[in-house]
Amino acid sequence: MFKNTIKSSEINRSRFLKYNKIYYYQLYKYDKLKFWLIRFKKEIKKNKPLKKSNMSEIKFEKKEKPEELIRTEELIDDGKYDNALEIMRNFDKKEEQNPQNIVLCRLLGCKLFFQQSLYEQVVDLAKKTYKESLGLGKNILSVDALNIMAHALIWNYQLEKAFEIVNQGEELLKTLKQDSPTAYKQREAYIAYIKGLVYRELDNHELALEHLEYSLSLRKELGVKYEIAASFNQIAIIFYRRGELNNALKYAEQAIAFAKESNKKLYMANCLRTFATVNRFLGNYDRTLMIDKQSLAIYKDINNKLGMAHVLNNMGEHYRVVGDLEQALECLEQSLALYEGLGNLRFIAGVYDFLIQVLIEKNDLKKAQQCLSNLKQINTQLEDKQTKTIYLLNKALILKTSPRTRNRGKAEVLFKKIIEDDVINYEFTLVAFLNLCELLLIELRFTNELEVLDELNQFIAQLLNIVNNYKSFKIMCEVYLLKAKISLISFEVKKAQRFLTQAQQIAERFGLTQLKIKISAEYEDLEKKLDLWEKLKNSGAPMAERFDLAHLEEQIGGMIHNRTLLSTHVIETEVAIHKEKIICLVCRGEVLKFSYICECGAIYCGNCAQALTDLENVCWACDVPIDYLKPVKPKEDETEEIHVDKKHKTS
């Protein structure tokens, strides 16, 4: 696109004084190195003595930006990339150009490539632009080149290099005089923004928020609306990844408002995409699809292929969750084609992750196997841990569909391997755990083997421990609901009631409205069927009958099917960092106000203490009464063994 340009030679003081009106520049033309001697026509009005002897430290006279570059930037912001490119090419052909303007032109080229998601081209051009900018002396344009290079490196998953480059830009910025506080602050905000993105990709959400909020505060002072929108948008992403959906929604809405005011299409599309994701996590599926379509239309208008691919991928997962597998397949295949055109193997691997699962649900195992073979090739090319995990996970999912015990056994081994490895992606670990539990439940249903139940409970305990460590309360509710149903098939009704109560209290505490409704319905269903469960217990009913009554397979299947649920991390918003937190034994939330502390040391928040009082009025840790003025409904001794009717047991 561009001819390579300027690398100014150093001119010492004596040489500069000798020629006075002459600057020497080295220009590249048509990819071949040529040196041009440019004589400024404009006379230097005042010949002041130079304080420094190095030409690289001379400040260039500030000039108005050429009309062509102003027009180019407008065209880029409007998504008219071809027109912008043509102007830059014509500008580049002019032989006598101010070197600062040439650097400005190169930076616009970086911006154009970035908005087209051509990140490798951004990095290459930014490197050249940075070298060229050094001829201008210590200059803020060098900071610009380093910043956009670091930003592009994040998208290429070169996080360590990105952090190194952005730090280099930050150090350079500190050495510059703040002749223009606005320009300085704008770069400072961008540096904080980039660091926030790096920390986000490293799953360090606290540091990510710290930097992004700082960038937002600076950008609010400056009043540049599209930059404010970008910071709001990234903060919304952090909050929805943490599962703080109300905060995510608030920030996403503000991001859209500022993006609209800026009238910049790319930022509008990006903010809409985040807004759609937040609504998807909230379960507002109709609204999600409408917003996704709005975002997709803008990406198409500006021909942003990466944005189109992202939205289509999201829509594919949306259609899968709501059960429209044909639409899901169509969207995912379109997304895959766009990613393949861009050549981004990591994004391609991500689409195959969803695509294979859709094909499994459609029972198109032949095509799923073909996709797995393609994924295997990508894994060989990339050789990174995350892609390897995606490959192993989907290989296990395909093996799990086999009617042969041998293949299901291989799937079980792979799921265990993913669980035992260091956590690369929290979602992959959960998917592996849940699928492993489902395999064990299938085995338990048809064999009635008590050892299988023991193993299942061990894995669920591990799963709950991980969920608790990540403070993912949404999935924690589902796990307690699963434990309640497993308790039922063991005829441990009181245990089941406790787990349901715990799930309900967590949903209540963290505003998980839909889960609260679901758990209440399960509780009511159990109350209606207490007599029936007692009859099954007395008759030693087979596992298959218990599974059906508990709807156990529906529960585990629903958790596996809804990947949106698994990718939601929830932590409490009111965190007192300065003091040790006191956690409620039931809802696992921090005890902030009223609490009940048992003689044994167990601590309950006010709501949970009341719930336990209504349920059985005993402490779960030591069984002493919570309220001595009310009757106690102690948990009856429930047999830990499952009564197995030998005639129903299969070999």
Image: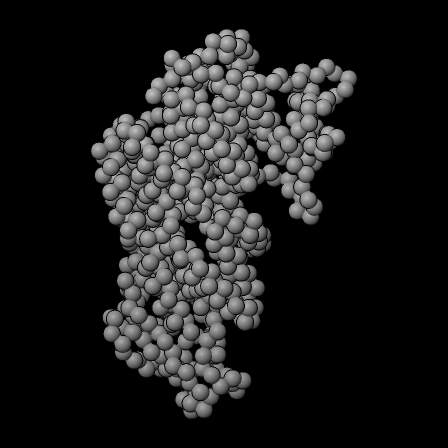
Quadrant position of residue 403: top left
Q: Nearer the viewer, residue 463 or 18?
A: 463
226 relative to 612 in the view: left or right: left
Q: Nearer the viewer, residue 62 or 425?
A: 425
Q: Which of 454 and 210 is in front in this view?
A: 454
Residue 597: percent from left, percent from top? 73, 31
127 relative to 640 in the view: left or right: left
Q: Residue at x 53, y 41 (%)?
A: 470
Q: Which of 163 and 249 is in front in this view?
A: 163
Residue 359: percent from left, percent from top? 28, 32
The image's colouring method is one colour
The furthest residue to the right = 629
State whether residue 283 is above or below residue 159: above
Q: Can residue 642 be seen in this view?
A: yes
Q: Can residue 186 be seen in this view?
A: no
Q: The C terminus appears in which quarter of the rendering?
A: top left
Q: How many labels does the image show?
A: 0
Q: Which residue is drawn at 49% across and 41% down?
A: 241
Q: Residue at x 45, y 64 (%)?
A: 165
Residue 65: percent from left, percent from top? 42, 65
459 relative to 328 in the view: left or right: right
State whether residue 287 is above or below residue 211: above
Q: The N terminus appears in which quarter of the rendering?
A: bottom left
Residue 391: percent from left, percent from top? 32, 43
